[in-house]
Image: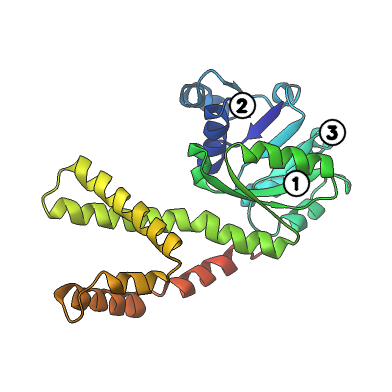
Amino acid sequence: MYGLIGCGNIGRAVAKGLIFNGHPINVLVRDNYLDCIQSKLGQNAKVFSVLGDFLTTCDIVLVAIRTSQLLAFLNENAHVLKKKELVLLQAGNIADIVSQSDCPSDLQYCRAIANINVEAGLGDVVILRTPNKGLENKVLDLFGKIGEVRLVDAPDDLHRLSMVTGCYPAVIGRFLQELIDGALKLGLDSNDALALSLKVFQNTAKTIELGRVEPKAHWRTACSKGGKLEKAMNELDDQFNKDFNFPNWLDKLSKSMVKK
């Protein structure tokens, strides 16, 4: 049986994805969140507030608390966690945190980073190879139920891939909201604005994939040469380049996430 500690955004998404795909899970939360989390996750989740009781029900524990809380959590519970296999779902210098903790040097753990889309079973999960092949295979099987899994050899690879898989859903969601708001301003009702924005976004992405063309080349073909749309898109392109340089933003975010 798998258990989950931490029911924030990612933890809750993992739990919902597993439950939706028929995989029961036990969850540890703070006492004052018991009823709330139970109602959100439903009957296929068993919710606990006492660590000792929770640990008796599971062999493999998914830890989805914040990176900043991980060292204190490991130190406080080293005496019981040493008997379990852990899956640490945090970004950052996790190996350093584990080595600094009071946990034994042979603590059995695997690192995995999942994105928010696992809730719908459409997630992207990056898993770092571990010498414990039994644990690695179990984790691959578990996360394969809620998304596409990539196995990498080095922490740097884990970080690079998870920056894209983990951060891009937020950026895409924010951009989609702009598309929806634009459709609303044109007079579409909220249902049509949402449905059409999603459909056009998905179909455009699929067309680019099937046509094997670069996105910028694709948006150029949507514009009549010298037309009003081309002029408007050039203005938008200039705005992006001047006011918001996404690669620089992502690089800055990436460096901030690996600071000790």
Q: Quadrant of the C terminus?
A: bottom right
Residue at x 53%, y 36% (from the top left corner): 12
Asked if the residue at tag 2 contacts the one at tag 3, i.e. Cβ–Cβ closer than 8 Å, the answer is no
Q: Quadrant of the N terminus?
A: top right
As helix, strand or loop, the secondary structure at mark 1 comes to: strand
Residue at x 53%, y 71% (from the top left corner): 251
Outermost residue, front direction? 211
Which three-letter amino acid code belongs to the residue tagged 2? His
| Between discs 1 and 2, the one toward the N terminus | 2
Q: Which residue is mark 3?
A: 83
Q: Position of residue 205 (x, y in %)?
A: 39, 58
Label drawn at residue 23: 2
Q: Is residue 221 left or right of residue 171?
A: left
Residue situated in front as seen by the camera: 248 or 203: 203
Label 3: few (<14), some (14–19) or many (≥20) C-alpha neighbours in 10 Å: few
Give how far apart the Cα atoms at labels 1 and 2 are: 20 Å
| Between discs 3 and 2, the one toward the N terminus | 2
Asked if the residue at tag 2 contacts the one at tag 1, i.e. Cβ–Cβ closer than 8 Å, the answer is no
Which three-letter amino acid code belongs to the residue tagged 3? Lys
As helix, strand or loop, the secondary structure at mark 2 comes to: loop
